[in-house]
Amino acid sequence: MSDETTVRAKLVRERERVQARIAAIQGGERKETSDGQTDNAHLWEDADTRDADLDEAVDELGAIDDALQRIDLGSYGVCVTCGEPIPDTRLEVMPYAVKCVDCAES
């Protein structure tokens, strides 16, 4: 596993990126009508897509927060299913992974 400081910094950067994504989704694009009112029909062309994107981002933020907590507890990089170390290559791609590849696929 990479050193704790590097991993924490990467997770914090990811957390900030996801928080910005959530803010952008929640803010939406508001267009004003000629009388200065917000035209709610133009907030999002597809509300279902917006909601799905928001749910995904919130889940990702939770996973990042959980990974930061696992660092604090000393259990980061250990598969929650089998207890074996999660390979560094997997953690580099998905730093908040909780399972090794074998357990994630089963």
Image (tube, helix red, strand yellow):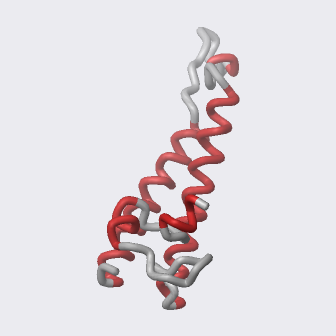
Horizontal and vertical percent position of residue 97: 50, 67
66 in relation to 56, above or below:
below
Residue at the outermost top position: 34
Q: Quadrant of the N terminus?
A: bottom left
Q: Is residue 25 found left or right of 7 in the rendered image?
A: right
Tell me where residue 104 sits by quadrant: bottom right
Q: Position of residue 7 (x, y in %)?
A: 35, 75
Q: Position of residue 71 (x, y in %)?
A: 47, 83
Q: Residue at x 55, y 57 (%)?
A: 60
Q: What residue is shown at x 51% (from left), y 86% (from top)?
A: 75
Viewer-side residue, 63 vs 25? 63
Q: Residue at x 63, y 30 (%)?
A: 49
Q: How many marks?
A: 0
- Front residue of 77/10: it is 77
**Where is residue 81, by image quadrant?**
bottom right
Residue drawn at x 57%, y 33% as measured from the top left:
28
Image check: 41 left or right of 19? right
- Quarter holding the C terminus is bottom right
Q: Is residue 10 above or below residue 39?
A: below
Report whether 88 appears left or right of 100: left
Observer-nearest of 101 and 59: 101
**Up-down: is 52 above or below 35?**
below
Residue 42, position in %: x, y?
62, 18
Residue found at the far bottom of this picture: 74
